[in-house]
Amino acid sequence: MTSRSAQHGVLARGSFAVAVLVSLAVLFAPPSDVPSAPPGVDKVVHLSLFLALALTARWAGVGRQVAAVSLLVYAAVSEVLQGTYLVGRDAELLDWVADSVGVLAGLALYAVITRRRATR
């Protein structure tokens, strides 16, 4: 029997690590480093970012419930921190909603992919 870590491999864990690093750069960049964009684009970025985090977390072997709870808490904490002087950006409830939708979409996508592989 292979260990869970060996089963998911270095590529999966590395992908998750890269997704985490990208999320840190995107979520905690100073306001001067955030490019201007049309309204709503930031929600797409939030959704995509958390979809990638959820998908790569599951691929790396993180359990579904652990991934869901951890990422939802991470999303909430990141929004709170964005609203403080430490980051100096705006905290928005809709950003957390977009993050949450991304987490759910990433978990659902992983489930679909693994079910399809299991039926082949």
Image (cartoon, rainbow, N blue to C red):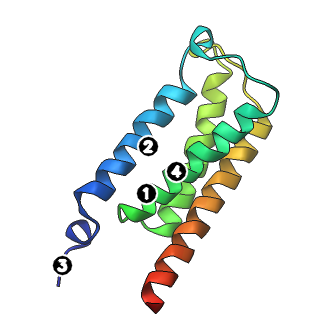
Q: Residue furthest left?
A: 1
Give the SS element for disc 3.
loop
Q: Is residue 14 left or right of residue 30?
A: left
The reply to whether callout 4 and callout 2 are in contact (CB within 8 Å) is yes
Label annotation for residue 29: none
Residue underneath mark 1: 57
Q: Where 88 falls versus 95 (above or below)?
A: above
- Whole-percent x, y for residue 92 in the image: 76, 31
Specify the amino acid type for callout 1: Ala
Residue underneath mark 2: 19
- Whole-percent x, y for residue 65 in the image: 52, 67
Is tag 3's residue or tag 1's residue first in the polypeptide sequence? 3
Residue underneath mark 4: 52
Give the SS element for disc 2.
helix
Residue underneath mark 3: 2
Q: Is residue 62 visible?
A: no
Q: CA distance from mark 1 to mark 4?
A: 8 Å
Taking the spot 43% from the left edge, 90% from the top edge, the residue there is 120
Taking the spot 62% from the left edge, 12% from the top edge, the residue there is 31
Specify the amino acid type for callout 2: Ala
The reply to whether callout 2 and callout 1 are in contact (CB within 8 Å) is yes
Q: Is residue 72 visible?
A: yes
Q: Residue furthest right?
A: 39
Specify the amino acid type for callout 3: Thr
- Whole-percent x, y for residue 74 in the image: 55, 43
Give the SS element for disc 4.
helix
Q: CA distance from mark 2 to mark 1?
A: 9 Å
Q: Is residue 73 left or right of residue 60?
A: right
The reply to whether callout 3 and callout 4 are in contact (CB within 8 Å) is no
Which quadrant, please, contains the N terminus?
bottom left
Mark 4 Cα-neighbour bin, 10 Å: few <14, some 14–19, many ≥20: many
Q: CA distance from mark 3 to mark 1?
A: 19 Å
